[in-house]
Every structure is written in C-alpha cells, then in structure tokens.
Image (cartoon, helix red, strand yellow):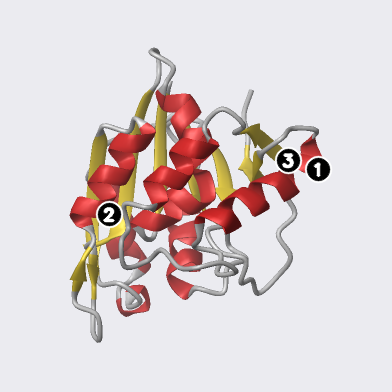
Amino acid sequence: MKIVCYCAHADDLVLGAGGYLARLAAEEENQVTAVFATDGLMHPPKYTDTREWAKKACETLGIKEIKWLNLQNQRFDSYTMIDINQRYEALELKPDLLLTNSKNQLNKDHRIIHESALVVTRPLKKHVNVLSFEATPWRVDPFMPQFYANITETLDQKIKALEAFKSEVRQWPHPRSGKAIKTIAAYWGMHAGYEYAEPFKVVQWFK
C-alpha cells in the first residue's frame, strides 16, 4: 500500500500521526512518503532550518522518502490554492491512503493543507482514503475522531522522533513535550481500549 502523510510542517507528522506511521512503515508491503508543505525553514524571528531534524525524525519512524513543497512557514495564505495543489500533484505520488492536518486546527497553515488534501484526493482517477489528525490541542472547533490507531508498541519511537526537533521541544505541560505526547496518547487510548492510541477523523473512505 502507498501511504502519504501530507502535512503543513514536519513536526505535525510526528505529533499527529508518528505512532501510526511507524506501524505502517514497519510493514514490508507499505511505502510511506512524507510530504511537508513548508520549505523547512523557520522564518523571522527564528531563521532555523528544520530539514535535517525532519530527516532524522522520519528515519526514527522508518519513513525513507521526504518531499518538500517549499511554502514559507506561517505564510501559506499568501499562495493561491491552485499553486499549492499543483506543487503536490507534480510529485505524482498516487497514494492509497493519505493522512493530513485536521481542518479544526487554530493554525491557519494546517487548515489550508487540509483543504488542499481534499482537492488533490477527489475521486476522479483514483479512490484515496483520507484520515486527518490533530498536531496541537488548539482548535477552532471540536475534534471528533472515528478511527483509533494502537500505538502502544511505537510510542517510544514517536517520542524519540519529536526529540529530533531541537528548538521545538518544550517542557511539560507544553503539548510538544515527551510527557504530553504520552499523556495525550493515554487519553485517546482510554477511548479506544488501548494503552496508547492516536485518533483520526475519517475524511473519506472507499471500499
């Protein structure tokens, strides 16, 4: 199965779907590709290059292929939707399953990439299953998941992958802390009858 995680920023992949992607990447028949809409640079006032951190995080999760769309961080609204979509479509990935940012996130970059994901996975030439995830707990609307992935065996990989983003990791109770990842995973695991879980909203599903 071909799987794409199409998200706004590299740490979104880890925070929202790192445990499930590590599971998928461990299955020999799967091909997992990370597509980051950003250029990997933290623009003023930080000027930090996160691309090597992203590569290390993906390696930790078993993801071997990374693509960048080279949009400026926190400036996605300065691009037209057709430009963003064409940058993704030029990759010609043709996934069976696509994971993307939730439309409920406060971060506007996340909402824009969710919209782009809906466009590029329209069931015209191929049926693509789409799941969305939360990268942060800051929302404009409630997040109501219907799909839960058991990440009990891959939680440690997820936490280690986050640690690759040196300037982004924070101390508890910030949501980008190792303790927060474990606490959130336990919370959603409680909903699903797992020790630790990641939640996803089913955006579209074909069978």
Q: In this view, does 160 lie to the left or right of 148?
A: left
Is residue 121 at least partly visible in the picture?
A: no
Q: Which residue is drawn at 40% across and 13% down?
A: 29
> Observer-nearest residue: 204 or 168?
168
Q: Which residue is drawn at 40% across and 20% down?
A: 30
Residue topped by disc 2: 86
Figure label count = 3
Is residue 116 at least partly visible in the picture?
A: yes
Q: Is residue 75 left or right of residue 178?
A: left
**Label 3 near label 1: C-beta < 8 Å?**
yes
The quarter of the rendered structure image containing the N terminus is top left
Residue topped by disc 3: 189
Please tell me how crowded label 2 is: few (under 14), some (14-19), or many (20+) other residues with Cα within 10 Å.
few
Task: Provide the secondary structure element on which disc 1 rests.
Answer: helix
Residue topped by disc 1: 191
Task: Tell me the quarter of the picture where residue 39 sits.
Answer: bottom left
Q: What amino acid is found at the position of numbered circle 1 in the picture?
A: His
Task: Provide the secondary structure element on which disc 2 rests.
Answer: helix
Q: Which residue is drawn at 74% across and 65% down?
A: 142
**Which numbered disc covers residue 145?**
none
Task: Tell me the quarter of the picture where residue 44 sits.
Answer: bottom left
Among numbered discs 2 and 1, the one appearing first in the sequence:
2
Q: Position of residue 196 (x, y in %)?
A: 67, 38
Q: What amino acid is found at the position of numbered circle 3 in the picture?
A: Gly
Task: Tell me the quarter of the picture where residue 83 sits.
Answer: bottom left
Q: What amino acid is found at the position of numbered circle 2 in the picture?
A: Gln
Please tell me how crowded label 1 is: few (under 14), some (14-19), or many (20+) other residues with Cα within 10 Å.
few
Q: Where is residue 136 in the image (x, y as percent from the top left)?
A: 56, 64
Distance between mark 2 and mark 1 Cα atoms: 38 Å
Among numbered discs 3 and 2, the one appearing first in the sequence:
2
> Observer-nearest residue: 107 or 114?
107
